């Protein structure tokens, strides 16, 4: 019996790599060698309230967390608002914002992602309305404090369109502070056709809080076991921003459109207290303290027939919503205001109850879809206003490729309702031919002088686009559409609208693409140039920024300063 021979293995000599093949000093290898491989870029989506962070090439963020600017739960960017502030106040706000961003970014790298920031490139999702001072603060913290190798600024609307698998379309980003619409053509944002509206998550929170204070019922904590608490009006300190945000996320949804929505009033104002002060003053004398806990307080607060003004309109709005609502009332447990937690063995509970009427859950989001005005357009109107600004030959392509993104769009029924509102706005208007209220009066019985003037239809040029309206991430597209709309509607991947921008950035990082990249060397060179400049050659400073940092607007990309195309007139005045 022969002994088996050991198999021989032929070895191939590997040539020495040339200078061009040597990996970058920031990346020790060109292959992903582990789950936390250094090729994966860190993707950060800094929203005004919710941040999403993770690694490129992954299908969802590693962590999603809420950031607030203060104890009142306001947005993080509110501290950097320029407004009518002096230079010293702006500098102080910038310093406070930098310290908050430093704590957030260090927590992201060392607590959430568990990675070394000095070996990680960063893709930063750049929202079009993000202030330049905020981008400057983010870059300064990451370059000078965390020693990031480079930062790529990627437009958020382009990333959302990339996550939907398209290069051309119209993107609606309905976030916390504002709703923004930007057309995308060939992966290039058309900022000249961008339209915004303040009707977004923050305004919806204010509207929901006003409705709950008017028509909700508050049941305080029980003092003695077995004794039912006495129902009363909802106290103002019982509904902080965190409770309203949680209630909007868990309880509210968007109902189907109803008739006469154009004539309904809005419960909104510059602040939460101002939004309800005038409305509650009329109802305080009518509010009964003996309310049946099993019934919503809206049934116990009736309006007098002799009352006029906002209260009559509000109760008419409530009656209309109640008739068209099928949602059930909810008993929501909330922390009792002004009470400290108690230990075991005590008979006092710190949990109170809030009876939320079903029509509030279903119709609170009507604020986002009611017809607005010049300053506050609805989410459907900003889309049509943007379509009016794009070239005529591209309107059909944009109208049939609409992508909806943002956290406010996560409300159930938001996208189908948006589709219905777009079709309603493009339908022919109902012309009121007579200036009389008698339905028996006909046009033939009155001379032409009695006829009302023709209605100004601002969306008349877009009416032929009505059968072509299609939302790519609509889970329930209508059947009565054109062939083009049926081919596009609902074809986008089933990603959550709130994560579309981050997923697009993750895809861009995996494909080694992205926006404008700024390296740390370029940042340091700009700093050296600032100190070497003489007073005769000043460094450009962005308007409205503090003068202490001369690099404002010098390195960070700003879409508002995009160079004009060849042949465009110059905006500079002659000397």
Image (tube, grey):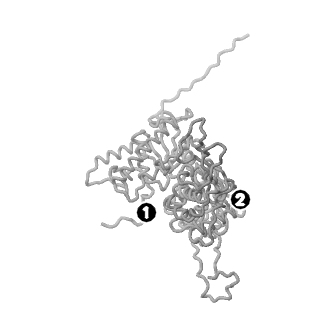
Mark found first going from the N terminus, 1 or 2: 2
Residue at x-position 69% and y-position 54%: 294
Instruction: Residue 395: name its quadrant.
Output: bottom right
Residue at x-position 48% and y-position 56%: 129
The residue wearing badge 2 is: 326
Task: Looking at the picture, tell me which residue is in the foreground, 390 or 89.
Answer: 89
Residue at x-position 50% and y-position 30%: 15
Say if residue 65 shows up in the picture: yes
Residue 373 in the image: above or below residue 434? above
Task: Looking at the picture, tell me which residue is in the foreground, 272 or 187.
Answer: 272
Say if residue 468 shows up in the picture: no
Neighbour class for label 1 at 10 Å: few (<14), some, many (≥20)? few
Q: Nearer the viewer, mark 1 or mark 2?
A: 2
The residue wearing badge 1 is: 566
Task: Looking at the picture, tell me which residue is in the foreground, 179 or 346.
Answer: 346
Residue 292 in the image: above or below residue 223? below
Q: Quadrant of the N terminus?
A: top right
SS at mark 2? loop
Residue 372 in the image: above or below residue 348? below
Q: Quadrant of the C terminus?
A: bottom left
Contact, mark 1 vs mark 2 (Cβ under 8 Å): no
SS at mark 1? loop
Q: Position of residue 155 (x, y in %)?
A: 51, 52
């Amino acid at each position: 019996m022969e002994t088996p021979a050991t198999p021989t293995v032929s070895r191939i000599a590997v040539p020495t790599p040339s200078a061009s093949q040597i990996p970058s000093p920031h990346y020790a290898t060109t292959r992903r060698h582990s789950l936390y491989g250094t090729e994966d870029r860190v993707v950060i989506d800094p929203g005004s309230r919710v941040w999403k962070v993770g690694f490129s090439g992954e299908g969802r963020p590693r962590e999603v967390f809420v950031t607030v600017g203060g104890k009142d739960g306001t947005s993080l960017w509110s501290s950097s608002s320029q407004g009518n502030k002096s230079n010293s106040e702006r500098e102080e706000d910038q310093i406070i914002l930098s310290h908050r961003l430093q704590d957030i970014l260090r927590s992201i790298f060392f607590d959430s992602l568990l990675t070394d920031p000095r070996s990680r490139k960063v893709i930063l999702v750049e929202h079009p309305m993000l202030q330049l001072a905020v981008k400057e603060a983010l870059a300064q913290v990451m370059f000078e404090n965390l020693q990031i190798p480079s930062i790529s600024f990627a437009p958020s609307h382009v990333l959302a369109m990339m996550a939907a698998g398209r290069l051309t379309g119209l993107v609606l980003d309905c976030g916390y502070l504002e709703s923004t619409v930007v057309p995308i053509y060939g992966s290039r944002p058309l900022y000249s056709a961008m339209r915004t509206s303040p009707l977004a998550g923050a305004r919806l929170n204010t509207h929901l809080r006003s409705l709950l204070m008017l028509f909700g019922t508050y049941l305080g904590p029980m003092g003695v076991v077995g004794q039912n608490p006495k129902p009363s009006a909802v106290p103002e300190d019982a509904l902080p921003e965190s409770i309203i945000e949680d209630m909007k996320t868990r309880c509210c949804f968007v109902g189907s459109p109803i008739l006469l929505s154009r004539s309904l009033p809005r419960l909104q104002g510059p602040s939460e207290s101002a939004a309800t002060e005038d409305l509650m003053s009329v109802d305080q004398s009518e509010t009964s303290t003996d309310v049946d806990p099993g019934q919503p307080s809206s049934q116990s607060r009736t309006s007098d027939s002799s009352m006029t003004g906002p209260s009559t309109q509000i109760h008419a709005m409530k009656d209309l919503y109640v008739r068209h609502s099928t949602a059930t009332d909810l008993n929501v447990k909330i922390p009792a205001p002004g009470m400290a937690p108690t230990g075991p063995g005590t008979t006092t509970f710190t949990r109170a109850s809030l009876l939320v009427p079903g029509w509030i859950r279903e119709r609170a989001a009507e604020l986002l879809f009611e017809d607005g005005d010049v300053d506050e357009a609805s989410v459907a109107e900003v889309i049509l206003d943007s379509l009016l600004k794009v070239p005529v030959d591209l309107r059909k392509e944009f109208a049939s490729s609409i992508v909806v993104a943002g956290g406010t769009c996560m409300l159930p029924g938001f996208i189908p309702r948006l589709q219905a509102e777009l079709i309603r706005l493009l339908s022919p208007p109902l012309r009121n031919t007579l200036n009389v209220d008698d339905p028996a009066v006909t046009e033939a019985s009155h001379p032409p002088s009695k006829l009302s003037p023709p209605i100004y239809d601002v969306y008349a040029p877009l009416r032929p686009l009505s059968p072509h309206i299609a939302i790519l991430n609509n889970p329930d597209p209508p059947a009565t559409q054109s062939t083009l709309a049926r081919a596009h509607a609902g074809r986008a991947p089933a990603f959550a609208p709130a994560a579309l921008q981050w997923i697009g950035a993750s895809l861009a990082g995996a494909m080694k693409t992205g926006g404008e990249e700024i390296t740390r060397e370029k940042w340091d060179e700009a700093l050296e140039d600032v100190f070497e400049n003489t007073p005769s050659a000043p460094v450009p400073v962005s308007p409205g920024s503090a003068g202490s940092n001369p690099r404002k607007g010098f390195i960070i990309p700003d879409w508002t300063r995009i160079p004009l195309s060849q042949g465009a007139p110059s905006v500079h005045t002659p000397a």
